[in-house]
Amino acid sequence: MERKNISSPSFFIGKGQGDDLISFGSGQPDLPPPPQVYDILPTYRSFKYGLIQGQENLRDALAKQYKDAHMDQFVVTNGASEALDLSLRALYEPGAKVCLPRPYYYSYPHNVALASMEVRYYDLERGKINLENFKEQAKHCKIVVINSPANPTGSAQDIETLKEIEKFCEDKHIWILSDEVYKDLIYERENYLIEGQRVITINSFSKTYSMCGFRTGYLYARDPEFLQKVIEMKTHTSMNTNILGQEMAFEATKVSQEFLDEQLKIWKERRDLFYEGLTGLGLDVWKPEGAFYLFPKFPGKNPTDVVNDLYHDHKVITYDGHWFGSPTRVRFSYALDKEKIEEGLERIKHYLDQ
Amino acid sequence: MERKNISSPSFFIGKGQGDDLISFGSGQPDLPPPPQVYDILPTYRSFKYGLIQGQENLRDALAKQYKDAHMDQFVVTNGASEALDLSLRALYEPGAKVCLPRPYYYSYPHNVALASMEVRYYDLERGKINLENFKEQAKHCKIVVINSPANPTGSAQDIETLKEIEKFCEDKHIWILSDEVYKDLIYERENYLIEGQRVITINSFSKTYSMCGFRTGYLYARDPEFLQKVIEMKTHTSMNTNILGQEMAFEATKVSQEFLDEQLKIWKERRDLFYEGLTGLGLDVWKPEGAFYLFPKFPGKNPTDVVNDLYHDHKVITYDGHWFGSPTRVRFSYALDKEKIEEGLERIKHYLDQ
């Protein structure tokens, strides 16, 4: 029987809940949000439009998380996705180019195209930015996207690299869209916040607080004209972000550091287990500093075959590197518990042994 | 002391809550949503990504509200605003024109510009479409927007007019974006659903169920290619609509017709009271068939002066017709209780008597 190749992540949507499937697919935490976010629900009764820019309590709490920031510098959005979409649309200029990392989060090239701009890529080397190559590409662009820690590589860029990028872009008047949605999932160091007059920080409650489905994200920027443009645009394209999602996110901002540390510990244990497992199977993979992805190469195998074989013959869901601009690797999300990770490793071993 | 003219609705955001102000400004129901929508909150615990297209239970319930419709023909969006934004972006073609009613809902021209298309207008006559003029403009366009019942005019178009538009656009292969967010607020007849292969119906839970702040809207279309394009786009621009807002909307779909009839009765009483009040004051205004707006002309007065005078000297909020493409009229929303409407009428009388 002929088998049609799986062509995009959407093939797997809704799959991976059954007992028999092991899903290293979707990039969403399996751990539930902090219980506090549900505590406000029983008595919640608001229903009117909120401020387009976002609820004041939430923006005030966010401003306190960033040094010298003010609540007026934040716009609450329908997840990081809308923050990215609005930012690119607001910065649109005919003929402008946007520099993306490759491999990339699979929406990036679409976001750039949807904002009618042109893509250039800076190629990562085993997840890391090569500064020379970066500068060579970035100098032709109005905007660069930095994603550290990154999806799909799990890599956090070195702080020296990020500082150099900050300086280079400031000198050349290049805008930086810094997608830091994994900022609280770094195992080796604190997050380094990229700063500057033309920096737009994009973040979300989806990864840190497992609130993916509630779609509460935000952008933080210093340029008042840019902020005004985004708010004006959002007035016409979606209005306020769901007011209840925002209140739940506000509750999440009150969660203790201990809670976040505890989560991080769980993620780190999973990373170590899975990294050791995959290297033990002889796969070519680096140890990621953040997020919850491993991005191995299967020597002698095409990633499309790997994804299809693992799914059809071993009931293991993985994502094809092609979807992220990488023709040699396979993305594994380790957002699942240790028992499942171990069972998944067994199945991969079985596949490789054949 | 010099007074700066109020230049947009955003001036009034957050105002109108005080005891002393009477707000005929914002177009949002003051009546709360059906209590059922809150009933699910205490036990709600989901948090994961939902389907980009929207929750199946909600789409299934929506499909049952439309004759011969299927749940796959619906996309749940962040309010009608996102439905409009995505539809226009999906239909984008270089150089294409979009035909809008004038006066218009104030976002329309911005939505068209944000989708990089060009606007043409068909001018309404006391809220009504002149078919000859409509056809003259529409024949140059790829897309027309129909808004019945309408903001800011309150007019519902005659069924014969809508049928003629359906036929004309089908013959000429023109897409119809039918913004029917006020479909359940018609006082004179049932809503007439515009249908066709190139028709996109836009709707929302904001007006019928007073759920503005939760931003749950949808589009309904028959063209599978268009639907696929919208879903693909939404994957990158916002992902699923807030999952909890969708569950609340699903509960709203179970609300009895009696509840909706009861609401409609309240709105009709307000309309009659306010319409009689304004005509009694000698203002030039038509009796609107739907929505919750009156759009009078103040003979001998510029609407900008009226809005400023009423606000600064009489503490009455109204919206300048200029914001809706009408240089002679003032928009009043009667989304407030009878006592306030009566107090508002008193103040307007006082203003006119001066």
Image (cartoon, coloured by chain):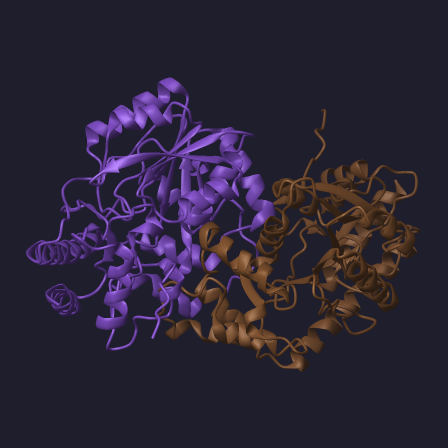
Chain colours: A purple, B brown
Q: Residue at x 92, y 43 (%)?
A: B299
Q: Residue at x 64, y 49 (%)?
A: B16
Vertical position of residue B182 compared to residue A77: above or below: below
**Quadrant the C terminus of chain A occupies:** bottom left
Residue B114, position in %: x, y? 61, 41
Name the residue nearer the viewer: A90 or B79. Answer: A90
Residue A77, position in %: x, y? 46, 48
Residue A108, position in %: x, y? 40, 44
Residue B14, position in %: x, y? 58, 47
Name the residue nearer the viewer: A39 or B192. Answer: B192
The image quarter containing residue B253 is: bottom right
Name the residue nearer the viewer: B332 or B230. Answer: B230
Vertical position of residue A61 compared to residue A334: above or below: above
Residue B215 makes an appearance in the image: no
B98 relative to B296 in the view: left or right: left
A6 relative to B123 in the view: left or right: left
A125 relative to A238 in the view: left or right: left
The image quarter containing residue A336 is: bottom left
The image quarter containing residue A157 is: top left
Callout count: 0
Residue A143 makes an appearance in the image: yes
Residue situated furthest left in the rendering: A280
**Quadrant the N terminus of chain A occupies:** bottom left
Residue situated furthest front in the rendering: A1
Residue situated furthest top in the rendering: A171
Vertical position of residue B290 compared to residue A294: above or below: below
